Amino acid sequence: MSRLSTEIHEQPAAIERLLEYETDHVRRLVREMRGKFDYAVIAARGTSDNAARYAKYLWGAHNQLPVALATPSLFSLYKAPPRMNGALVVGISQSGQSPDIVSVITEAATQGRPTIAITNDAESPLAQAAEHVISLHAGPELAVAATKTYTASLAAIALISALLADDAGQMDQLRAIPELMIQNLASLAPVLGKFERYRYMSRCAVIGRGYNYATAYEIALKIKELTQVDAQAYSSADFRHGPITMVRESLPVILLAPNGPVLKDLRALITDLKRLGAEQLIISDEATVLAEAHLPLPLPAGLPESLSPLVAVLSGQLFAMTLAELKGLDPDQPVGLTKVTETL
């Protein structure tokens, strides 16, 4: 078994550890910071940037908190940081090593803004620069492609949201996620052999909207990292504004279509893609939607849409890993990548 496979299956336990060790800490943190900010700025790169996309939707919808993504080059290269009056500034990085992300947190501290580091290394430069640190407790992540640190970052974002809102129901839903992840991993095991159909694909689209806009980007990133396939992520809305013209017969399209306000739009797109001849892989908890798929990838029942990205990404992780193995590539060590990427 590859390291990557092991780490994919460690994710439920990683989320449980995060909730066990950080819930009381984050509760104290949000009490201390409540009323000290009007919006959030998040600095991140790569997989962590996809976690930040999730925060834009979750904190916006559940906490009425506007979220902006930082432009680290303004801080690190141009030396022209914007004013961040009224902001909570958050850095997300699995390693906490990237200088450009650290520079955003350092500047925020200089401007007197509250700062949080979300990282798997509580001794990293990012953690040292931040006023507060939320440790992911994911354990060592040895495969180059991030999996458990990604879902742990999502869980940290959801934990902040629930405690900031003082929402006991949201906390109960979050505590149920590890079991739903276990169920989903078990249900996907028999499907892995069907991924061979896509062994020779050279490109694909990954489409989501709302909370799972982030998931579309993360799945596309994993496919690119592990398989060298040109995978492009889109929201279902943006896809109609031009990219839909690239759809040809048998183009693989991965769609994230959980129950929720975005499902109506995804249903309509699924119908259009079927007419255009696309090969649809659909991740959903809605039986009538899954029935339209060439390859249905079911989500467990009882999964709230706002937390569905923690579970929905599992299908994409396993798809990318299995496809890499089928192509004779090493899923633990993708060509040209290293575990820690430091950008200036």
Image: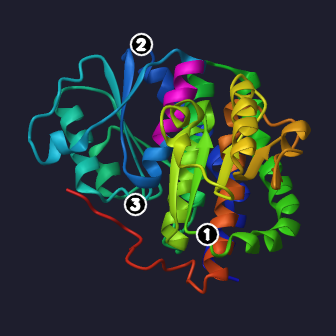
Tell me the quadrant of the picture where the C terminus can be found.
Answer: bottom left
Label 3 element class? loop
Q: Residue at x 62, y 49 (%)?
A: 18
Residue under label 3: 95
Tell me the quadrant of the picture where the N terminus can be found.
Answer: bottom right
Query: Does residue 80 appear left or right of residue 66 in this picture?
Result: left
Residue under label 2: 35
Residue 158 higher or lower than 163, as above or below = below
In the drawing, what numbered circle is on residue 201? 1
In the rendered image, which quarter is residue 220 located in? bottom right
**Residue 253 location in percent, x, y?**
65, 52
Task: Answer with mark 2 or mark 3, whichever residue precedes in sequence.
Answer: 2
Residues shaded magenta: 52-61
- Magenta stretch: includes residue 208: no
* Magenta portion: prevailing SS class: helix
Rounded to the nearest whole Å, what is the CA distance between mark 2 and mark 1?
Answer: 51 Å
Q: Nearer the viewer, residue 183 or 122?
A: 183
Q: Amino acid at mark 1?
A: Met
Q: Amino acid at mark 2?
A: Gly
In the rendered image, which quarter is residue 208 located in? top right
- Mark 2 vs mark 3: in front: 3
Task: Answer with mark 1 or mark 3, whichever residue precedes in sequence.
Answer: 3
Crowd class of label 2 (few under 14; some 14 to 19; many from 20; radius 10 Å)? few
**Residue 243 location in percent, x, y?**
50, 42
Q: Nearer the viewer, residue 115 or 8?
A: 8
Label 1 element class? loop
Task: Answer with mark 2 or mark 1, whichever residue precedes in sequence.
Answer: 2
Q: Nearer the viewer, residue 60 or 296?
A: 296
